[in-house]
Image (cartoon, grey):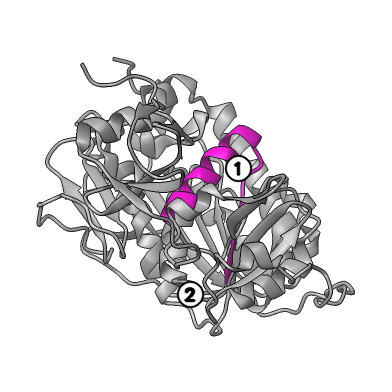
Amino acid sequence: MTSLPQDFIARIENDTFVPTALLQALEESAPTSVRLHPQRKSNFTTTDRVAWSSSGIYLPERPSFTYDPLFHAGAYYPQEAGSMYLEKALAQLELPENPVVLDLSAAPGGKSTLIASFLNHRGVLIANEINRSRAYILSENLTKWGYANVYVCNHKPSELSCLQGQVDVLVVDAPCSGEGMFRKDHQARAEWHLGNAATCASRQTDILDEVWPLLKEGGYLIYSTCTFNPEENENQLLHLLDEEGAVKVKLPHFEGLQADRHEIGQYFFPNQIKSEGFYIAALQKTSRTNTKHRPAKNNVLNNVIPKELSAFLLQTQELCYWQEADQVYATTPFARSIYGLVKDLKFLKKGTHVATAQKKSWAPGYDLTYSLLPIWNLPTKAVEAPEALRILHGESQQWEAPAGFYIVTFEGQAIAMIKQIGQRFNNLHPTEWRIRHLPK
């Protein structure tokens, strides 16, 4: 086992703000928590709930999520309990009916899936991730979570100027030295050193300076890290309070939380609360950002869907469809109106992918497997756990059924899509999403 870094121990021991029992707590086992999807079912029976989350629970032990088909159905998301506090922070804000939310460093998707549930198809969530490979994981997790008012893009903070003065809520889960994860991630211990912590603090300052102009007047910044270092936490926010006219947003208190040194945000110390190490704060912007000239939002997209496809699609006021080249997408009317501002970004996900044009027909998009809003009523194939895992592993099988596309379900939850051809089906589950090894 990797020991705690000596410089870290010395800093904690010399900081009277930090609880004295923290170092001992970091040598103990970490709790396991998951956040349940509010519109899907899972098989957990525990009553040990996360106090600051409407859908968070603690598990008595860490199961093998990979071998639970309901995990692949997006029925729940494994997430540190502290991170679930974002729900309470969001609920504290005075937001418009349709807020524009930007999750700046969103992978792998814990906070983004929580935001999507909080919005519940109101407004729009733009989930950004600078690392391309991590952005694909983010897109997968948000697709499985099923909300249509979500875009996923892949940019540096400096490349998001199209959103200048447009964002109601900016969530910055800043890259940090990772001290709060020392209990469960011993690689984080091995990589930690004083120089790295200082580098993280400098990088965080640059990020905040780059993205502060994206907020509207009256918009909110929610800032968080998984570290105990004040230089990466409350001290990062002082210049926004002093120089940018930002004001503190008082966040709800729960037993065990500790206000930071300037009473801006809250610390989650593992010895005081059932969570990994975490810090979160919220500020409101009071100054105005001069927004650049924006192109007209109308006539940006082709909203005329070919008749041969529209015959399959359900028409509802909750969704609008559009076509780009040979692809058709769906999102909510408000999220569609925002697309005109951000259409030049590098997207990995645009709402819900509905269909792809083929030579003589249309193939349903894989996003339809998990969509919470009905779009295309495909027939289903119900399976038990062993067959579900084989399909999630990527196997194709013999099956007697009429030709066409089917949604595979396990315990009433959609887990995959297949295409029946002749006396067998082709497995359409994306290669990069498949289970690598089946249980022995």
Q: Residue at x 26, y 32 (%)?
A: 387
Name the one closer to the observer, 111 or 145.
145
Residue indicated by mark 2:
249
Name the one closer to the observer, 409 or 243.
409
Residue 111 at x, y percent in the picture = 45, 54
What separation in Å lies between label 2 and label 1 (alpha carbons)? 22 Å
Magenta stretch bounds:
124-145
Residue indicated by mark 1:
201
Any part of residue 103 in sight = no
Dot 2 or dot 1: first in sequence order is: 1
Residue 127 at x, y percent in the picture = 59, 55
Main secondary-structure element of the magenta-colored stretch: helix
Mark sitting on residue 276: none
The quadrant of the rendering that contains the N terminus is top left
Classify residue 341 as left or right of residue 383. Answer: right
Classify residue 403 as left or right of residue 67. Answer: right
Secondary structure type for disc 1: helix
Residue 95 at x, y percent in the picture = 53, 81
Q: Residue at x 29, y 21 (%)?
A: 438
Residue 79 at x, y percent in the picture = 34, 47
